[in-house]
Image (spheres, rainbow, N blue to C red):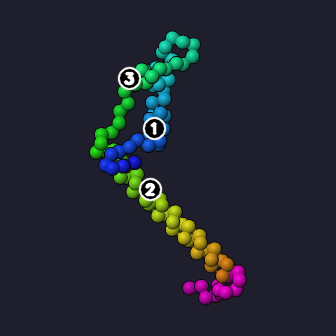
Amino acid sequence: MVFEGRVLWTHGLHQHLLVRYQQRIYDIAEGGGSTFPNINGNQIRDLKIGKPGLVEQMEIAATLTASDTMVLGSEARSHAAGRTFKAMLEELMTGRLSAVTLAP
C-alpha cells in the first residue's frame, strides 16, 4: 500500500514474512535448551529479514494496485451482467419481452 509516497507494510506482507521465516524462527526458539520452544524479543529483533528496496517496493505496490483495479472492474462488469440477466429474465417470464425478438 502506498500512502503519501511511502510504502507501508500491510497485513498480507506480515503474513508472508511470518510464513517465509517460520522455520527459521522455530529453529531459534528450539535452540534455547528448554523442553519447549521459547523465543524472546531480542532474538526477534536480531533476526535479519530481507526486504526489497524502495524502488522495487513501489513497483510491487503499483502492480498490486493495477491488479486490484482490474479485479474491481471485472467484479463490476459481472454484477452488471447479473443484473441485466435478472431483468431480462423477469421481462421474459412476465411476457413483456418475447424471446423471438431476441433471436439473431
Type of residue at label 3?
Asp
The residue at the point 49 percent across, 63 percent down is 74
Q: Quadrant of residue 70?
A: bottom left
Say above or below: 22 vs 28: below
Packing grade of label 2 (10 A; few <14, some 14-19, many >=20) is few
Disc 2/disc 3 C-alpha distance (Å): 35 Å
The residue at the point 51 percent across, 68 percent down is 77
Disc 3/disc 1 C-alpha distance (Å): 17 Å
Residue ID for mark 2: 68
Residue ID for mark 1: 14
User: In the displayed image of the protein, which residue is found farthest to the top?
Assistant: 33
Among numbered discs 1 and 2, the one appearing first in the sequence = 1
In the drawing, does residue 101 fall left or right of residue 75? Answer: right
Q: Nearer the viewer, mark 2 or mark 3?
A: 3
Asked whether residue 29 is in view, the answer is yes
Q: Magenta segment, which residues? A: 92-104
Type of residue at label 1?
His
Q: Quadrant of residue 80?
A: bottom right
Residue ID for mark 3: 46
Say above or below: 70 vs 8: below
